[in-house]
Image: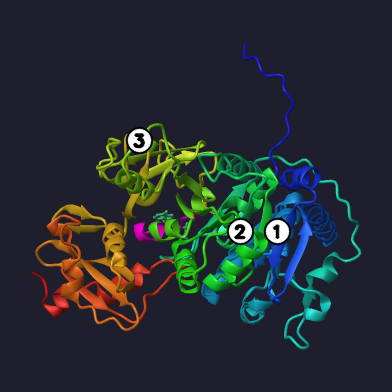
Amino acid sequence: MDLFGQMMYAPLQLSSLLEQAARHSGAVEIVSRRVEGDIHRYTYRDCHVRAMKLANALTGRGIVAGDRVGTLAWNGYRHIELYYGVTGIGAVCHTINPRLFPEQIAYIVNHARDRVVCFDASFLALVEQIAPHCPHVEAWVMLSDAAGLPQASALPLESYEALIAGQPAHFDWPRLDEQLAAVLCYTSGTTGNPKGVLYSHRSLCLMAYASSLPDALCLRASDTVVPVVPMFHVNAWGLPFSAPLVGAKLVLPGPALDGASLSALFEQEAVTLSAGVPTVWLGLVDHMRRTGKRAGTLQRVIVGGAACPPQLATALGELGITAVHAWGMTELSPVGTVFAPTQGFARKTAQERAQIEAKQGRVVPGVEMKIVGADGAELPWDGRSAGDLLVRGHWVVERYYGMNETCLSPDGWFATGDVATIDADGYMQITDRSKDVIKSGGEWISSIELEGIAVAHPEVELAACIACAHPKWDERPLLVVVRRAGSTLDARQLLSFYEGKVAKWWIPDDVVFVPELPLTATGKLHKLVLRQQFGRHYSDTGTAA
Ligand code: ADP
């Protein structure tokens, strides 16, 4: 007969994270740079009270468990209140990426059937544009006080402050089934319509716990954390949940994500840890170099969302900041792997250590991973064999929102769409998105590695490497490059820079110089657009060798 443990059961639910912060780290601050331009500061205790007022307001409006409340907002204290106030009553906080095209935003607001949408003043024009196409939205709430509302608008707008004003400062968070939906986030949909991933209280709580571990993001009560990664992009990598969990001070940068603004905020708030995509750190490094600034209190930055070019990690290191490489995706809410040293790491040479740090890291406990070949057979963890990366675990999607079928393989794994190697110590390295890999004469060439070399050239600002159709080799790599201002670098000079760095047949056959590169709504290179533009370069220009 089964014998069950005889321990208390408390469902994993998000409200308990904020409740705990209010109780045990009540005086710790949440500091926000507001859309209005000023700095707002209050404590976890204040945040909890306002989340409870919001819960009362929403309940009073008839928002019930399972309803979706959309947000179009930067990282700020009101957005945190929405994260907790909405999910605490069992409703779903649907974070919307304002960088998507308006038609895509309208599509996902309708697909999610958001009943209320809360938005920052910066997105007023966007809201006015999409509202006529979103008939199910009952209220458009601007995250401001009543005085901040526009004088005239075609929409019956409400202010957030008016919504919560006068509400009771206490709310008994209901005990929820931990499997209930809490947050909804759509993938950026670079191909086809965006797909929704519906996180549960359980999945988000477990990720908050596991991602705080020393060998993951290593979050501590003594940390001051800035999620530069937006709260509309996969929960700002879970930091709005993990920071309250450990009682860390939270600093929210609002819309000002350039190097100068971030550097000033880091200095002013004595920030120790931050997280964002490589382009953010390139901006910070550039600013710090120009102004002669050093790291100050900032010890670590988590770099993810796209591969961290090795010279970025070096540049940060020279400024006294450790770059910690991490990998994840919307379907994993998002943290999958993070760099941490293993036994014996300290005894390796500096070069070996740098090579390992450039990889995407080791899996966070709670997620499992493997790589498979074209036939589905598992590949060895030898650091060389590259195959499709599959994952499963507590915070991995099972099906997309509104879909009847699972998105898992029959044996329960999720195919990430990434191609990777895994070495004997379990360090995973992404070599490509499966759709970006360059298949030359039946062999695979990593576009990420070729881009990493190009941007290491001092005269290259940005580089993308794409597969071009080729009559003899099926596909050959082509570099599309933005030169630094004033540079006259030519194709031959750049290609000779590859010699000795990769196998000869990996070296791209040509370079196209462009004034700028197209980016997706999540700030990544939009290779689909580049392939449409330059995918026939070798046949069109006759450069095919
Ligand atoms: P999108 O909506 O653009 O797919 P995601 O954040 O879900 O946004 O993107 C996830 C993808 O981003 C991953 O599957 C991977 O291809 C890429 N990615 C994330 N982190 C890294 C990293 N550290 N190195 C390389 N690629 C990364």
- Give left or right: position of 56 versus 311: right
Residue underneath mark 1: 80
Residue at (86, 50) in percent of width and height: 171
Assign a secondary structure to mark 1. Answer: helix
Closer to the camera: disc 2 or disc 3? 3
Residue at (61, 52) in percent of width and height: 239
Closer to the camera: disc 1 or disc 3? 3
Earlier-in-chain disc, 1 versus 3? 1
Residue underneath mark 3: 347
Q: Identity of the amino acid at label 2?
A: Val
- Quarter of the image with the C terminus is bottom left
The yes-or-no answer for disc 3 within 8 Å of ligand 1 is no
Give the percent coordinates (x, y) of residue 177: 71, 40
Between 300 and 305, the residue placed more toward the observer is 300
Q: Is residue 274 magenta?
A: no
Assign a secondary structure to mark 2. Answer: strand
Q: Is residue 312 magenta?
A: yes
